[in-house]
Image (cartoon, rainbow, N blue to C red):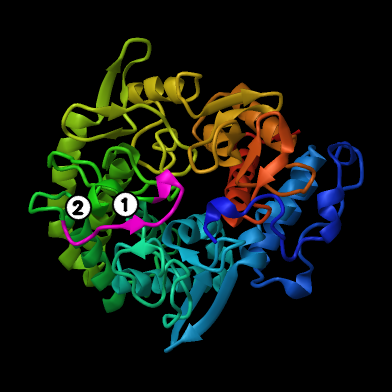
């Protein structure tokens, strides 16, 4: 089943079954917090550095409920989603999203990202992440237009009868999303920066990176619509691509077309601005790696040429003059002058651009955009009895994504705002001890996806960053 269909009734394998019966009143500071983390004997992957970090945070922060949430959420990817082994002499790591047995290039990268700073003290953890890089390269070579894959490369997709596209065995879903190819670059670059290890960047990896550049170039559509199209027989409008599967028209201008957003929802206009910024950042990271790593030298020139083209187009077409907020970034555009003004909780989003390294948090256009996306003028900004935050079409109206509250905190320099984000997350886990995909603005026990590892792990990243930089906010 697709991600949107995993509602609250979905089983969270590995968590104590009684957790769904725990009321909010039972999870209060000073009370005993139930054990909801999967038992040690059942954990998929164990890291001494992660366990030491959990123990340190639990010991030193005053907010015991946040400490309990951190203990549950931060290791959730390792505990429940990682399948690690050695294949053909190389580490290989298959990472599911949680309640769907498939590996998204985006989710898997984001799920292991917060562990990178701990790899210096844990070689097993380092090898596990190197295995993710190897597995992602294999998937990209199989099909750079796919967003999610199976471990068994002979497995046939459950969407084979509904999707009109070129679906190969081993592919779970074939929704073309720019960010799917950016995230593996971000992970590889971050891994290299943290460890100095270049052993993951073998011939297969370099082949995958060249294929990324080729795919991005095809989707600039200077030479026609390109080889990708997608249609689905479905009642969900956001699951299909109009105009025979190629999307609504876009005037070629250097931006890269994306038929889907990181939410796996179809775009309205093909030029998805947050994803194009992410692509530009990723191409610059490829250049940096290619200049320092001999095996990647062949990537420097094509990555630089494409980056120049995308950057020029972003400088010309990414902004919109708003009557209230001034010059800000559009969410989507088409090159004909049309813009879609909104933001979505999924990352890359407009809110997340500094987090992804696309620009400084102090950038004035970003600040204007931030004020817009965190206001009622954003059609997917919801405010209720239990906080406020960004959602999106994927789940529907009035459903706030905790990920957007986490991202608000990660991109803020304001202590009061960061503390508000922590407090809001603390009171909206629905009595489960874990983060979820979304919750109703007036009822945090009405949530989607009990087992969504990305949301759990990025919450842990936020708490750990606060612990290191602003520990007083966790008292």
Tell me where residue 186 sits by quadrant.
bottom left
Q: Give residue 72's position: percent from left, percent from top.
A: 73, 54
- Residue farthest bottom in this picture: 88
Q: Residues within 10 Å of mark 2 (few under 14, many from 20)?
A: many
Residue at the spot 41% in from the left edge and 76% down from the top edge? 170
Say whether marks 1 and 2 touch (CB < 8 Å): yes
Q: Give residue 267's position: percent from left, percent from top.
A: 34, 42
Q: Is residue 192 visible?
A: no
**Which residues fall within the magenta stretch?**
226-239
SS class, disc 1: helix
Which residue is label 2 attached to?
219
Q: Earlier in the sequence, mark 1 or mark 2?
A: 1
Q: Is residue 444 above or below residue 200?
A: above
The residue nearer to you, when weighing 21 against 187, is 21
* Tally of numbered tags: 2
Left or right, residue 373 beside residue 204: right
Question: What label sits on residue 178 in the rendered view?
Answer: 1
Residue at the spot 34% in from the left edge and 53% down from the top edge? 177
């Amino acid at each position: 089943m697709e991600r949107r269909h995993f509602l609250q009734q979905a089983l969270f394998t590995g968590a104590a079954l009684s957790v769904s019966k725990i009321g909010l009143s039972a999870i209060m500071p000073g009370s005993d917090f139930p054990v909801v983390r999967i038992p040690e004997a059942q954990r998929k992957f164990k890291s001494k550095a992660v366990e030491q970090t959990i123990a340190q945070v639990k010991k030193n922060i005053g907010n015991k409920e946040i400490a309990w949430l951190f203990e549950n959420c931060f290791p959730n990817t390792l505990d429940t989603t990682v399948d690690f082994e050695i294949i053909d002499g190389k580490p290989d790591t298959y990472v599911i999203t949680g309640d769907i047995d498939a590996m998204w290039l985006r989710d898997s990268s984001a799920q292991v990202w917060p562990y990178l700073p701990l790899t210096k003290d844990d070689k097993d953890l380092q090898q596990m992440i190197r295995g993710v890089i190897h597995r992602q390269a294999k998937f990209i070579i199989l099909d750079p237009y796919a967003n999610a894959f199976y471990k068994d490369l002979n497995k046939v997709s459950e969407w084979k009868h509904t999707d009109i596209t070129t679906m190969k065995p081993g592919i779970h879903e074939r929704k073309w999303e720019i960010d799917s190819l950016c995230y593996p670059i971000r992970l590889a670059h971050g891994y290299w920066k943290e460890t100095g290890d270049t052993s993951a960047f073998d011939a297969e990896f370099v082949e995958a990176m060249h294929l990324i550049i080729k795919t991005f170039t095809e989707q600039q559509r200077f030479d026609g619509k390109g080889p990708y199209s997608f249609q689905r027989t479905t009642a969900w409008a956001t699951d299909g691509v109009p105009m025979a599967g190629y999307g609504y028209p876009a005037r070629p201008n250097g931006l890269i077309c994306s038929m889907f957003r990181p939410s796996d929802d179809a775009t309205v206009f093909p030029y998805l601005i947050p994803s194009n910024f992410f692509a530009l950042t990723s191409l610059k990271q490829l250049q940096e790696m290619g200049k320092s790593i001999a095996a990647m030298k062949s990537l420097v020139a094509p990555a630089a040429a494409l980056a120049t083209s995308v950057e020029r187009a972003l400088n010309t077409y990414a902004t919109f003059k708003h009557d209230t907020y001034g010059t800000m970034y559009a969410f989507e555009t088409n090159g004909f002058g049309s813009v879609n003004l909104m933001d979505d909780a999924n990352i890359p989003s407009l809110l997340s651009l500094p987090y992804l390294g696309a620009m400084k948090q102090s950038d004035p256009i970003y600040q204007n955009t931030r004020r817009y996306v965190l206001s009622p003028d954003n059609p997917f900004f919801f405010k209720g009895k239990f906080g406020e935050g960004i959602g999106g079409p994927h789940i529907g109206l009035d459903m706030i994504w905790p990920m957007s509250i986490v991202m608000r905190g990660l991109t803020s320099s304001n202590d009061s705002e960061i503390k508000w984000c922590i407090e809001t997350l603390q009171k909206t886990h629905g009595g489960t001890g874990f983060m979820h995909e979304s919750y109703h603005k007036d009822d945090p026990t009405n949530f989607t996806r009990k087992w969504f590892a990305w949301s759990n792990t990025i919450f842990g990243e936020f708490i750990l960053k606060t612990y290191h930089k602003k520990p007083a906010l966790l008292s």
